[in-house]
Amino acid sequence: EAGVAQSPRYKIIEKRQSVAFWCNPISGHATLYWYQQILGQGPKLLIQFQNNGVVDDSQLPKDRFSAERLKGVDSTLKIQPAKLEDSAVYLCASSLAPDGTQYFGPGTRLLVL
Amino acid sequence: AQSVSQHNHHVILSEAASLELGCNYSYGGTVNLFWYVQYPGQHLQLLLKYFSGDPLVKGIKGFEAEFIKSKFSFNLRKPSVQWSDTAEYFCAVSPGNAGNMLTFGGGTRLMVKP
């Protein structure tokens, strides 16, 4: 069974630029999550989707971050414009059901200069 | 909002030593509790979880954790560590009625010396 796929794996941008991350969950997983993991900290949930609807986005900085999950499969997370403090690893996870085990992808490591 | 504290940021042990990693959470209601592990160069993966029932939970690779409600704790244990247990360990909690709204602790880096 293929795992959660994410791309790109690494990205370096300058502040005020925009960036987008892509996630392909495990086939059949209805629930998808985006986390931000700053160096030395645990992952922080940004947004949770159930199919193509948002379940919770209370910790998503909506002035600069946006996410979508068209057709209830792949998802993209965008930052526009990026700030220095957005440097982090962005993790995508998926689960079969809202209360199921979350399976994590390898993450995208973002460096904002 | 809930929070999770992992008091040991770095732990160094020799092989065959016993392991206990602390995890305390703050949340007034029913909780679900998790331990995740990230081996070097690998993805985060679930080690074990507690939803209800027996407060002593057994996970993969010989790990176990005990939920002590009165202490708001969910400590991870292993009687004899191996070099291959070198990894970063994360405790996480979610409200009992929202099984997957995880709040993670800051993580503990474990290094096991051969």
Image (tube, coloured by chain):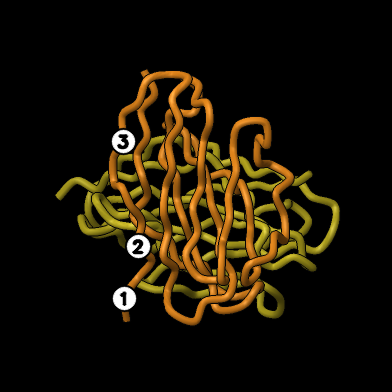
Chain colours: A orange, B yellow
Identify the residue at horizontal 37%, vertical 71% (top origin). B62
Drawn side of residue B102 relative to residue B40, left or right:
right
The mark lying in front, picked from 3 and 1, is 3
Q: Does A1 appear above or below B103?
A: below
Drawn side of residue B65 relative to residue A23, left or right:
right
Which secondary structure lies at badge 3? strand
Coordinates of residue B38 in the picture (x, y in percent):
36, 54
The residue that disc 1 covers is: A2
Residue closer to the observer: A93 or B14: A93
Chain hosting mark 1: A
The residue carrying pointer 1 sits among few (fewer than 14), some (14 to 19) or many (20 or more) residues within 10 Å by Cα, namely few
CB within 8 Å, label 1 to label 2: yes
Report the Cα–Cα distance between label 1 and label 2. 8 Å
Q: Where does the C terminus of chain A fall, quadrant-wise?
A: top left
Identify the residue at horizontal 41%, vertical 53% (top origin). A22
User: Disc 3 marks which amino acid?
Assistant: Lys
Checking the image for residue A5, the label placed there is 2
Residue closer to the observer: B23 or A13: A13
CB within 8 Å, label 2 to label 3: no
User: Disc 2 marks which amino acid?
Assistant: Ala
The mark that comes first in sequence, 2 or 3, is 2
CB within 8 Å, label 3 to label 1: no
Identify the residue at horizontal 31%, vertical 29% (top origin). A12
The residue that disc 3 covers is: A11
Q: Does A45 appear above or below A5?
A: above
Taking the view exactly as shown, the residue that stands out farthest to the right is: B28
Q: Where does the N terminus of chain A fall, quadrant-wise?
A: bottom left
Q: Does A61 appear above or below B100?
A: above
Report the Cα–Cα distance between label 2 and label 3. 16 Å
User: Disc 1 marks which amino acid?
Assistant: Ala
Coordinates of residue A80 in the picture (x, y in percent):
53, 31
